[in-house]
Amino acid sequence: MNINRRLFGVVLAMASLFSVGLASVAGADTLTVKTVDGKLHGKMINSDKVRAFQGIPYAVPPVGALRWAPPQPAARWKGTFEATNYGHHCAQNHVFDDMIFQDSTSASDLGSEDCLTLNVYAPAGSSAKSKLPVMFWIHGGGYAGGGSSEPRHNGDFLPLKGVVLVTINYRLGVFGFLALPELAAEQGGASGNYGLMDMVAALGWVHRNIAGFGGDPGNVTIFGESAGAFAVSTLMAAPSAQGLFAKVIGESGGALNSGALSMKPLAQVGPEDEKLMGALDVKTLDELRAVPTAAVLKAVSKGPVTRYSPDIDGKFLTEPVLAIFEAGKQAHVPLLAGFNRDEGSFLAKGMTAEKWKATAAQRYGDQAAEFLKLYPATDDAEAQRSAADFGGDAFIAYSTWKWIELDRKTGESPVYRYKLDLGAPPSKFHPDPVAFHSDDIEYVFGTLATRPGADWRPEDWKLSDQMMDYWTNFAKTGNPNGPGLPEWPEYGKGDPVLHLDNPITSRPDENRARYDWWLANDGKAAAK
């Protein structure tokens, strides 16, 4: 395993020599960059091959009167800001047991509301004249957890492919998406979506400042996984985000489902969210904003409302994302998107053919025979595969497919579709050798070594390098293809899908009948 890691590092280092001139690394002055808010100083990482600038404020801390308010531009500073450590991850309950943060020494750290920071990673040899493509990462976590300091999406390796990487924090859960009638009255009729507004504010910061780090503000690719993919599909539809990005990558998620995953209008979520005030025994916004962070999180953990997510607020989003894509009013930019084979592997555990047939009969009655043609169960192994497929379709795959399909029809730009099929080796948090939800992150960032307990194989390191090439090629040109890579056909006639496996292959969509069935049911299948 150590030999493979060293070989992987050598390959990346050689790539960086050709792409950004690593051999001509300048002196320490390359670590001081001037932004519109002031000078900042970074550090070298990954054996001095990458410049890192961490914890940069892109907005005023959203605390006090700015809790549940649109982000305000960061205040200018005097002197030089030391951008050598991550900012706090945003306040959140422990929704994911395996979440790890590099800005915290305590597993019980709830984070902070003073969290609107971003990180910039650039090749060591780049300068303000480089005009490298920019990749802007939005982390996942169900809009409720996560942060830019997670080791699995650090900036050690991706910049070696000739890009500038930006990772951000944005407000989460109740602090990012609370929608109240009182807030709507205060903010011109709209409330909620503060986390999405943070993303737009961070993109604005990139547009104004990234040239100084060697990035091209006119060539920004937004990409994200899970909630991050839901977010980038939403940003394609959000008027305030238009013009701030040139390409989009979505990994496992899309905000276009018209069924159980649909965004709700403000008029519907507002009265529900108002229950928080009763739970905290407060009557005014001033009182609510004065409640300590930990107390708000504790109240949320006990209900009655435990999950918060984007809404159709009439301002940030004036209509459903689905309707915007159907009308072709989304950003017309190249799209690369897909999902993993085993997004729903949780549903396969203990499944038998008998149980699966009984489930089909209970859920779908006289439609059970049709359902079992799509998700068959002739034996226990097939039933487990069908259960995993159905769980994945309900959870992630159908919404992602719907995004890809609609953008192909109305987006007027190239679309590329993938499926990650290679099952990862067992690890501390994922004991089964499957391509599970979020499995793609370490492959895309070249950070396989950060996954606890995984005994990586040569094919994993190879696939990671190939995926990094595909992703960065797409960021550079809008086309993921390049020398030494298996051809990735544009998603057009025949519905070609690139299967990320050992080896990588391309073939027509094998599961279209399943998604057509979901489409015919208007996304309601998972709710039955």
Image (spheres, rainbow, N blue to C red):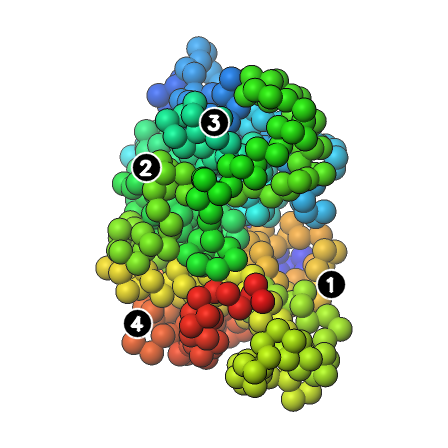
Contact between marks 2 and 1 (CB within 8 A): the answer is no
User: Is residue 212 visible in the rendered structure shown here?
Assistant: no
Question: Is the N terminus in the top left, top right, bottom left or bottom right quadrant?
Answer: bottom right
Q: Earlier in the sequence, mark 3 or mark 1?
A: 3
At 47% from the left and 16% from the top, the residue drawn is 80
Give the alpha-carbon distance from disc 3 to disc 1, as whole Å: 45 Å
Dot 2 falls on a residue whose secondary structure is helix
Disc sitting over residue 183 in the figure = 3
- Among the two numbered marks 4 and 2 on one chain, the one whose residue lies closer to the N terminus: 2
User: Badge 4 is on which residue?
Assistant: 492
Secondary structure under tag 4 reads: loop
Q: CA distance from mark 4 to mark 2?
A: 30 Å
The residue at which mark 2 appears reads as: 240
Relative side of 52 to 280, left or right: left
Tell me the distance, in whole angstroms, between the alpha carbons under discs 2 and 3. Answer: 20 Å
- Quick one: label 4 or label 3, which is nearer the N terminus? 3
Give the mark toward the camera: 2 or 1: 2
Query: Which circle, 4 or 2, is nearer the viewer?
Result: 2
Q: Secondary structure at mark 1?
A: loop
The amino acid type of the residue labelled 3 equals: Leu
Give the class, few, some or many, for how many residues have Cα within 10 Å of label 1's Cα (few <14, many ≥20): few
Mark earlier in primary sequence (1, 4):
1
Q: Nearer the viewer, mark 1 or mark 4?
A: 4
Q: Which mark's residue is nearer the viewer, 3 or 1?
A: 3
Q: Which residue is mark 1?
A: 431
Give the class, few, some or many, for how many residues have Cα within 10 Å of label 2's Cα (few <14, many ≥20). Answer: some
